[in-house]
Image (spheres, rainbow, N blue to C red):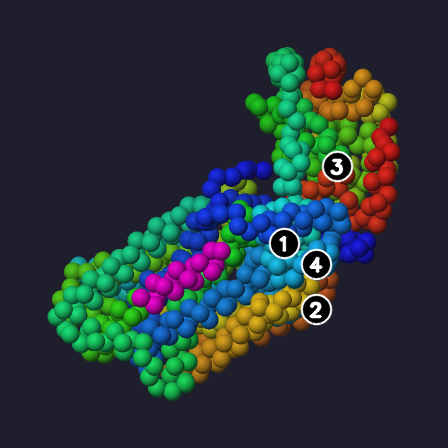
């Protein structure tokens, strides 16, 4: 999310306290009543004149604090609200960055560190030399990426967190069968690593290991991705490297 | 509330149908450039006042009333732009507000509006460009100048399509620079001409009042207002860039209303000065009023510069109109009305490249062929503009009417927007009838015939779709709606359609720790 705070248009003299109060209360009410609440509901709930309520709601939609849902009548909190809660990317300690850069120096693959706030993948430290696929691919197709499989394997009812609860194909190799994915996730749980070959992008493969705190809770995932050429030969070496790195990262991130 | 949530979230998908069309890359200037260039204020300023005078109206007051009516239209369109962003602009809005069949009629009207305005602008650009070299070409034979105009038309068309393919950013910046230069040139020329003219010919100063005085009956007055409204046509075209604009729900409405206000102010002042000059110098109505004016005042040297300004403005207008046309075709293709291949984007530039290539043959060939066949550029341009205006007026009328259906549908009815939309719709209906009658009286039938064909084609296509792919009709009106990643789900996992019924359940699950 690009931030353009900068100047606000026109002269602000702060003499519209009511409007600010109503705007904040609208956000609060949407959060309380849940996604799908209509403008009419909001006006009724806040005992506002409809015209005032609609104007302020549309203003908040314009600022992207609210999102108008596809039926055009319902509203939800916009992704920008995350800025209010301070839910920006957590900072990575310098020691952890050093561990990551050591790992990057030891392999030709690109190494990415992700965390899973709200059961979604968030890149915490992507390989600067070799950036990963766009983050919306990760959000949309968690079953097609190794980091996503690590996350799904940790969630009992993983179907709930799939966007649209559907296994969408990206390439021919993407898993679209829930049963097969369940088997794969069982394997991830048993063996402690997840792998993806050609499932997101043809010719690319990825290996990911979970990072756990001392109580065994999942706090992140570490992935190494590279070309599928000679992938099988490199895997065991990569596994050792990632296991070593996750062991060293865990106390720095917990 | 649970029922509500289910209905709202049912369509919330992780993939946006318009995904990939350079999301949020445009700023306020780009969007303003699109609207201003489509209006082509220079062309309107040069031609409208003398047309209004010829029809017996008063340019100054006509422009004022036209500005007010257009403000109402803009505020009605903004009822949509504040709520959704769609590359199909008015077409999508009408689908959402009234009915898919009426939406297709709007699409046909808009295609006529955008396409014929692009063609007219290409003819205008080539003819003004060649006229600005008239001193150089005085010796050339008529046949040679026709060939030159036709070649120029092709060159400009290729240039326009190239601009579309290179990317929106560069195209809009180019258009804005061109427009600002050409408006300032013409305004400066008018102001200087008026001051000098009123000194040499006292009646020029006295004619200032005549530019505002109401003359004739209601029909003359109405015709004057409609002809003034023609000058505003195209102000809404930045709506089509909505999905590509940052903070679009805030920016696009503001650009629309400010374009109308700004351009309206230029028109009111410019039309007053120009008609005072035309009346004061007792010039007969002609196709090139400003050139006549400058010749009478003895500023022959200014004419090539003014023609160049007009040509540049036409190039910008052609670019803006075809940019909106290309996005409309993209939207129709995404909706399954046109072949899916038209919605292919350039992989890196994220421009609707395929749609741009599809209109290229028409843009390149049609004006050049007409010019080469010896059709005089001025009448050709007039017919094309009249056709375009008829299409636009129908689309504006339908979108204002759609507000009356849309606001009740989403449960956000308030008195003021409904009254504004109703007033605008009635004014546009009256304007449309007046305009068609005016054209018919002048023996011009092309606009009405083209429009009738467009409407019939739209209805026929709707029937075909209804018969062969009824489920496709339900999916009409795709717009840039939010996807799962635009919503803040808080600490909860995304609630998806079928999981939404157990939304409360999930809170419990999450807190009691469903993790292994």
Q: Nearer the viewer, mark 3 or mark 2?
A: 3
Q: Nearer the viewer, mark 2 or mark 1?
A: 1
Q: Distance between the residues labelled 3 and 2?
A: 44 Å
Give neighbour class at mark 4: few <14, some 14-19, many 20+ (Cα, 10 Å): few
Q: Are marks 1 and 4 in contact (CB under 8 Å)?
A: no
Frontmost residue, B494 versus A181? B494
Which of the 4 image quarters holds residue B64? bottom left
Q: Can residue B215 be seen in this view?
A: yes
Res. B466 mark: 2
In magenta, the rendered stretch is B254-269
Circle 3: element type: loop
Frontmost residue, B356 versus B387? B387
Q: Name the residue under label 1.
A: A57
Q: Are marks 3 and 2 in contact (CB under 8 Å)?
A: no
> Residue drawn 84% across and 50% down?
B501
Q: Name the residue under label 4.
A: A47
Q: Nearer the viewer, mark 2 or mark 4?
A: 4
Q: Mark 3 points at which residue?
A: B491
Q: Where residue B470 sits in the image (x, y, percent)?
A: 72, 65
* B1 is within the stretch colored magenta: no
């Amino acid at each position: 999310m690009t931030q353009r705070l900068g100047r606000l248009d026109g002269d602000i003299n702060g003499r519209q306290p009511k409007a600010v109060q109503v705007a904040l209360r609208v956000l609060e009410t949407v959060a309380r009543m849940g996604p799908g609440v209509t403008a009419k509901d909001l006006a009724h709930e806040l005992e506002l004149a409809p015209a005032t309520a609609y104007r302020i709601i549309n203003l908040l939609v314009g600022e992207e604090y609210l999102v108008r849902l596809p039926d055009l009548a319902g509203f939800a909190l916009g992704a920008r609200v995350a800025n209010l809660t301070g839910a920006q990317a957590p900072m990575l300690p310098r020691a952890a960055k050093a561990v990551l850069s050591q790992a990057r120096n030891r392999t030709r693959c690109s190494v990415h560190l992700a965390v899973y706030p709200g059961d979604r993948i968030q890149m915490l430290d992507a390989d600067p030399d070799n950036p990963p696929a766009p983050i919306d691919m990760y959000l949309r197709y968690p079953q097609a990426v190794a980091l996503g499989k690590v996350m799904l394997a940790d969630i009992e009812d993983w179907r709930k967190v799939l966007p649209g609860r559907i296994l969408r194909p990206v390439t021919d190799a993407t898993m679209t069968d829930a049963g097969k994915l369940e088997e794969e996730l069982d394997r991830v749980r048993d063996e402690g690593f997840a792998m993806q070959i050609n499932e997101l992008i043809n010719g690319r493969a990825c290996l990911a290991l979970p990072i756990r705190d001392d109580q065994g809770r999942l706090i992140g995932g570490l992935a190494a991705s590279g070309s599928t050429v000679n992938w099988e030969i490199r895997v065991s070496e990569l596994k050792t490297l990632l296991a070593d790195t996750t062991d060293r990262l865990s106390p720095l991130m917990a | 509330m649970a029922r509500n949530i289910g209905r709202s979230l049912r369509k919330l998908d992780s993939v946006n149908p318009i995904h990939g069309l350079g999301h949020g890359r445009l700023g306020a200037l780009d969007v303003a450039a699109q609207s201003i260039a489509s209006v082509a204020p220079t062309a309107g300023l040069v031609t409208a006042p003398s047309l209004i005078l010829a029809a017996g109206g008063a340019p100054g007051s006509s422009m004022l009333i036209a500005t007010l009516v257009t403000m109402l239209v803009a505020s009605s369109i903004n009822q949509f732009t504040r709520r959704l962003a769609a590359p199909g602009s008015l077409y999508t809005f009408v689908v959402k507000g009234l009915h898919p069949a009426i939406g297709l009629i709007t699409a046909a009207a808009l295609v006529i509006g955008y396409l014929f305005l692009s063609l007219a602008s290409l003819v205008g650009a080539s003819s003004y460009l060649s006229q600005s070299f008239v001193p150089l070409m005085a010796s050339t034979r008529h046949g040679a100048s026709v060939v030159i105009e036709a070649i120029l038309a092709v060159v400009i068309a290729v240039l326009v399509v190239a601009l579309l393919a290179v990317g929106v950013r560069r195209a809009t910046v180019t258009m804005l620079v061109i427009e600002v230069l050409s408006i300032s040139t013409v305004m400066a020329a008018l102001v200087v001409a008026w001051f000098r003219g009123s000194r040499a010919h006292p009646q020029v100063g006295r004619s200032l009042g005549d530019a505002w005085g109401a003359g004739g009956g209601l029909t003359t007055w109405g015709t004057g207002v409609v002809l003034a409204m023609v000058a505003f046509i195209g102000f809404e075209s930045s709506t089509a860039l909505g999905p590509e604009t940052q903070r679009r729900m805030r920016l696009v409405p503001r650009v629309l209303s400010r374009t109308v206000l700004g351009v309206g102010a230029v028109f009111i002042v410019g039309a007053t000065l120009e008609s005072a000059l035309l009346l004061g110098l007792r010039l007969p109505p002609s196709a090139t009023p400003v050139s006549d004016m400058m010749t009478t005042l003895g500023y022959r040297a200014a004419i090539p510069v003014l023609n160049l300004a007009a040509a540049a403005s036409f190039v910008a207008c052609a670019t803006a109109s075809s940019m909106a046309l290309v996005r409309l075709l993209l939207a129709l293709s995404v909706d399954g009305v046109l072949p899916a291949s038209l919605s292919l984007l350039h992989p890196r530039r994220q421009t609707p490249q395929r749609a741009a290539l599809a209109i290229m043959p028409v843009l390149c060939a049609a004006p050049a062929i007409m010019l080469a066949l010896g059709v005089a550029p001025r009448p050709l341009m007039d017919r094309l503009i009249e056709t375009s205006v008829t299409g636009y007026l129908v689309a504006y009328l339908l979108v204002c009417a759609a507000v009356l259906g849309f606001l009740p549908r989403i449960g956000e009815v308030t008195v003021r927007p409904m009254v504004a939309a109703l007033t605008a719709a009635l004014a546009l209906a009256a304007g449309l009838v007046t305009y068609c009658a005016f054209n018919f009286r002048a023996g011009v039938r092309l606009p009405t015939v083209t429009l009738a064909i467009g409407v019939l084609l739209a209805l026929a296509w709707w029937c075909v779709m209804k018969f062969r792919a009824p489920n496709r009709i339900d999916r009409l009106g795709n717009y840039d709606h939010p996807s799962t990643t635009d919503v803040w789900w808080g600490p909860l996992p995304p609630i998806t359609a079928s999981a939404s019924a157990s939304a409360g359940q999930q809170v419990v699950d999450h807190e009691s720790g469903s993790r292994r």
